[in-house]
């Protein structure tokens, strides 16, 4: 759907050497990440769990495609995909609500699947394609789901809306928008403090009923 293009002078990888390099990066990153989660039991005394120093993790290299643009980054392996998008890529459309996997505000698509970016390590997305709310529209043309949300007043404050729209698109793509009940169940992980739920369901129903390509 999107043409891969270099960003900020970054060079796209399209040869064998590049792929081998990628694999080495991935293995190194996986090992580094595994090391982070392993704390020898003998190092901990009873009641000292909260006092374990975090320390500095070795930075790792990461290549991924965000909204059609290939990015090469050097990051702390503990960074979540959400923080990478917001803090390192300037893509603040994806929202941080709970930062705990409970609200859905951080929903994005990775290789076509919806994921909670606050629960996703960025380093594990090496080589994958990420689409955020900023990448849903095509040039100046809003995505049909964005238009439907506007038409049906599917938001009030708008904070949850990027995540709602990304989930709404997945809802139709995965064939889970065949009834109001089905939509409500699929969308139940996306919370809206403003209570725009009925209008959100109406928006999804309309896109589904019209057979619009999502
Ligand atoms: Fe990710 Fe709430 S910010 S689920
Ligand atoms: Fe305000 Fe959903 S529109 S939280």
Image (cartoon, rainbow, N blue to C red):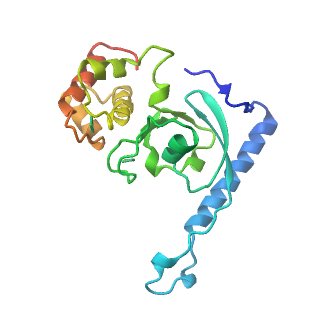
Above or below, comparing residue 26 to residue 40 in the picture: above
Work out whether 73 lies above or below 178.
Answer: below
In-image side of 17 versus 22 (left or right) = right
Work out whether 63 lies above or below 175: below
- Quick check: 143 left or right of 66? left
In the rendered image, residue 201, in percent from the top left (x then y), is placed at: 23, 28
Tell me: 96 left or right of 17: left
Q: What x and y, as percent, mark residue 130?
A: 53, 35
Q: Is residue 182 left or right of residue 174?
A: left
Task: Name the residue at 57% across, 22% down.
Answer: 2
**Residue 6 appears in view:** yes
Q: Position of residue 177 (x, y in %)?
A: 28, 27
Q: Quadrant of the N terminus?
A: top right
Q: Residue at x 23, y 21 (%)?
A: 152
Depth order, front residue of 150/207: 150
Q: Find the residue positioned furthest to the right.
A: 17
Image mark count? 0
Residue 208 in view of the camera: no
Q: Quadrant of residue 89?
A: top right
Res. 71 image quadrant: top right
The residue at 33%/50% (across/down) is 102
- Percent x, y of residue 82: 48, 45
Name the residue rendered at 68%, 55% in the picture.
59
Q: Say which quadrant the C terminus sits in.
A: top left
């Amino acid at each position: 759907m999107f043409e891969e293009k270099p960003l900020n002078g970054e060079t796209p990888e399209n040869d064998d050497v590049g792929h081998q390099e990628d694999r080495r990066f991935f293995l190194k990153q996986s090992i580094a990440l595994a090391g982070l989660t392993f704390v020898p039991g003998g190092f901990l005394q009873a009641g000292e769990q909260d006092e374990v120093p975090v320390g500095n993790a070795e930075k790792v290299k990461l290549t991924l495609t965000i909204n059609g643009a290939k990015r090469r980054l050097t990051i702390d392996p503990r960074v979540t995909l959400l923080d990478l998008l917001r803090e390192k890529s300037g893509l603040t459309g994806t929202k941080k609500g709970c930062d705990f996997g409970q609200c859905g505000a951080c929903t994005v698509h990775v290789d076509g699947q919806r994921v909670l970016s606050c629960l996703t390590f960025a380093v594990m997305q090496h080589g994958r394609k990420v689409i955020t709310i900023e990448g849903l529209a095509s040039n100046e043309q809003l995505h049909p789901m964005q238009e439907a949300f506007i038409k049906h007043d599917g938001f009030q404050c708008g904070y949850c809306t990027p995540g709602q729209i990304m989930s709404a698109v997945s809802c139709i793509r995965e064939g889970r928008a065949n009834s109001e009940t089905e939509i409500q169940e699929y969308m139940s992980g996306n919370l809206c403090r403003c209570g725009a739920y009925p209008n959100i369901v109406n928006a999804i129903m309309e896109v589904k009923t019209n057979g619009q390509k999502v």
